[in-house]
Amino acid sequence: MEFKVFNDSVHGHMEFHPLLVKIIDTSQFQRLRYIKQLGGAYFVYPGATHSRFEHSLGYVHIVFPPNSLSWVH
């Protein structure tokens, strides 16, 4: 079983279980790339470009550590 690694500015390298990668690769999850986490704040603060996609990856990293899904085949 090979984990996929994502790089994040807050969490650093994040490893995801293959089942989570299948969920991340769905079109429904990918649509989160275009929704801004901070709404229109990026007009005032140009560095505030966080998307719901990035936020969701960080959440999944915290909730499901790499070995937490070892029971999934």
Image (cartoon, rainbow, N blue to C red):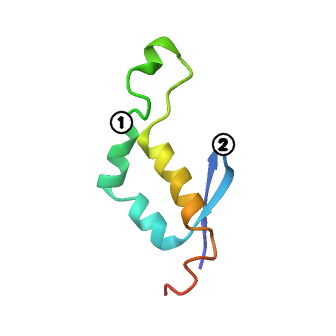
Mark 1, residues whose alpha carbon is within 10 Å: few (<14), some, or many (≥20)?
few
**Which numbered tag is attached to residue 10?**
2
Q: Earlier in the sequence, mark 2 or mark 1?
A: 2
Q: Residue placed at 29% from the left, 53% from the top?
A: 28
Q: Position of residue 37 (x, y in %)?
A: 43, 35
Choose between 2 and 51: the one closer to the eye: 51
Q: Position of residue 66 (x, y in %)?
A: 63, 70
Q: Residue placed at 38% from the left, 20% from the top?
A: 40
**Which numbered tag is attached to residue 56?**
none
Q: Where is residue 13 in the image (x, y as percent from the top left)?
A: 68, 53
CB-based contact (under 8 Å), mark 2 and mark 1 = no
Check disc 1 and report the residue beneath it: 34
Front: mark 2 or 1: 2
Amino acid type, residue under disc 1 in the picture: Tyr
Question: In this rendering, is residue 64 above or below 12?
Answer: below
Quadrant where the N terminus is found in the figure: bottom right
Question: In this rendering, is residue 40 above or below 72?
Answer: above
Mark 2, residues whose alpha carbon is within 10 Å: few (<14), some, or many (≥20)?
few
Amino acid type, residue under disc 2 in the picture: Val
- Label tally: 2
